[in-house]
Amino acid sequence: MTPISRRAVLRLLSVAAAAAALPLHARRFGADLGVDPALFPQAVASGDPTSTSVVVWTRLAPAAWGRELVLQVSEDSGFGALRVERAFAVGADTDGCLKVRVENLDPGRTWHYRFIVVGSRGDAASPRGRTITTPADDDDRDLHLAVLSCQDFSGRWYNSLLPLLDAPLDAIVHLGDFIYETTADPSFQSDDGRRVVFDDADGALGLGDGGFQAARSLDNYRQLHRVYRTDPALQALLAKAPLIAVWDDHEFADDAWQDVATFHDGRRDERDAERRRASEQAWFEYMPVDVGGGFEGVAVDAAALHPATRIWREFRFGRRASLTMTDYRSARPDHLVPEDAFPGAIAVDEPTLRDALPRIGETFEAWAPKLQPYVALGAPEYRRWRRPLARALRRAYAAEGLGADEVDARVEAILSAPMALPVANAILARHDASAWFFLDAGPIPEVPGLPRGLSWAGVGKSRLFDAVGSRYFVFADGYGLLARLRAAGIEGATGQRLGSALGEAQAAWLAEAPTRNAHTRWRLVGSSVSFTPLRLDLRRPELQAPAAWAQEVLLNVDHWDGFPVEREAWLDRFDREGAVLLSGDIHASLASQHRPRVVEFTVPAVSSKCLGDILERNVTGDAATREAGQRLAAALDPLLRHGYAGLRYAQTRRNGSLLLRIGADALEARYFEFDGALAGECLYEQPARWRAAVQEHRFIVVRGEGALRLDAQASHQTRSSGTVNWA
Ligand SMILES: [Fe+2]
């Protein structure tokens, strides 16, 4: 990276359009230059529009690095009325990316742009792009937005974008997972068809016993962006309207928080600031965003990267709407339940609970039946069980691949802390089953008067290192209690406090959004993850769930479900002024009415494996519970609706996109959905097939008397997928 001061970056940031079209004698190139797609393998894009500016982007193939690269911005598609013609140069510093903020444009109009490589054997143009400045502050015209998330490339195609290519669009909102950091992770990706193989294989992380890799180096992350942006459907969409994007986890690493990845579920420290910064640099280079520097072929400003990154920002579309784009990943604290939490450890003990529960309006007596008795194994009366427990635990941790010293340290820590009695006895039973009879320890008796506390098992943790019980499938009661205690500042055993998911600075900024946008009719809030609770009642008799799982569970607390107290506070706040929330990441369509004036549309994955399919794969892998898993997977959509009264529409088996038309008093939302199996096929050249395959589900949000009312409209389904129950 070329060392460059922040001031220098700011000075180079933008180009001002001329006030009127350039006279013919002042322009260097004719309108009808030949296009050379090979010189522009990622085509063009634009983004982050204001009423007077927009960022335009391209990437030049390495063969042409160093050659003069000219940007033209015109009022007309024939490039006859040029308002900008200016030369730049790009090279290895930005991987050939050029990003220019074009200023001094007129509000609310369409602009045409292209790039021209100047060469000794003739000049060649990029494909043409079209972009749109936002309307002036007092302009109240209709607004059309596409909303997208989760566009996995490995073995998958972006058919979901096809219905948007001939729709009117003012901007494209992308809520993250623009790229995926892994190459064919078998838990959700395919390795047939197209895929990414890292050129810098040594710079990548090996995962899954060497079977696939995750990006780590700058070159790895650049390559992902480079390859994803070769998709012709994505190129066509990005050439049509400006992009407004935030990242989610996969732009860095699955279920990440700050600079910490979660691939190894706590087996090792996965904090990696260098990796985080590499992922951010590539994002700033490749995305046409007006943050983070990296303009005009100048290397991204290192001072703008982690931990100083700020990508949350706001857009205004005249009087009609504001769009507040949030960042859920950069500041959020760790998941509340550590992936390596020992299930028998006590997260919150009885004295703490007796003291704390009244402070959150609860009583210890009411909670006691749901808590677990626990014993202090250091006490003399439990001496005889320490050795068999230590033996069994050592074996279990060694089987997880830990070194001897770490095994000893973990086992010592566990035995010197209180342990939930049911967990201790389950371990002892396993021990006895495989021990010689004279080594039998027998169970620890449950004597009256044992203290009771919330163990990690009581939150759903059942293995030593696992996302289940930590990020996924946590018990709703136990997790809810833990989250409320933590939000009230009650720390418990781990000493972990629950900070804001957004970080203090962003939270303060988001809280001010209604004031900033008091004059707009509609306030939209973009969040990479959904506010909709995904609560499944596995006690329902038709599921015949194994006894240990017959609980109410939260499917994914990597999302806002992980911060229930803060989530409710935001929803209450949004309800005061009214808001339409837009979210993604969960690979499902969800339409929710959270409050009288808060509606949310969660968009399905453009191409990533659908939630229902991921769940089915993961809950049917174990032969012992396969049938129960199949029942659960088959019942997922109705279970989601039963679990949350505000959820009006849920589907988890189709990919798709969302198109919003925002009128003065009604907002129309149309989901375009394709059966998940079709993501493995490219339908770009088969219009008849994709038109026959697309299913449309339409909703209207009506601005009424102090309310936003979410209504389902008659849905157009060319191929019925069965009934959809409108609550
Ligand atoms: Fe995703």
Image: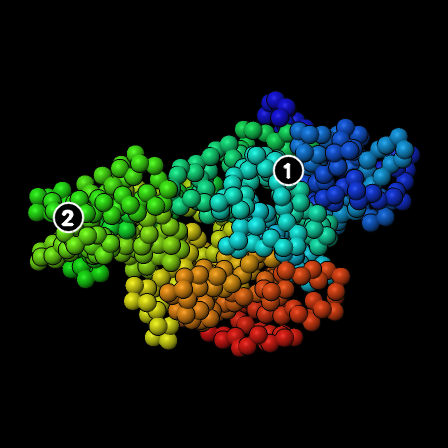
Q: Is residue 563 above or below residue 416?
A: below
The answer to whether the residue bearing label 2 lies less than 8 angstroms from the nearest atom of ligand 1 is: no
Give residue 363's position: percent from left, percent from top: 18, 58
Q: Is residue 724 above or below residue 275?
A: below
Say which quarter of the image contains residue 219. Answer: top right
Residue 674 visible here: yes
- Is label 1 or label 2 in front? 2
Q: Which element is circle 1 on?
A: loop
Sequence-earlier tag: 1 or 2: 1
Say which quarter of the image contains residue 640. Answer: bottom left
Residue 708 visible here: no
Left or right of 376, for residue 488: right
Give residue 498's position: percent from left, percent from top: 34, 45
Kind of residue indicated by mark 2: Trp
Left or right of 284, for residue 67: right
Q: Residue at x 72, y 40 (%)?
A: 58
Q: Which residue is mark 2?
A: 385
Q: Residue at x 69, y 30 (%)?
A: 92
**CA gap, disc 1 to disc 2?**
54 Å
Give residue 690's position: percent from left, percent from top: 70, 67
Q: Which residue is mark 1?
A: 199
Kind of residue indicated by mark 1: Asp
Give residue 322's position: percent from left, percent from top: 57, 52
Left or right of 644, for residue 419: left
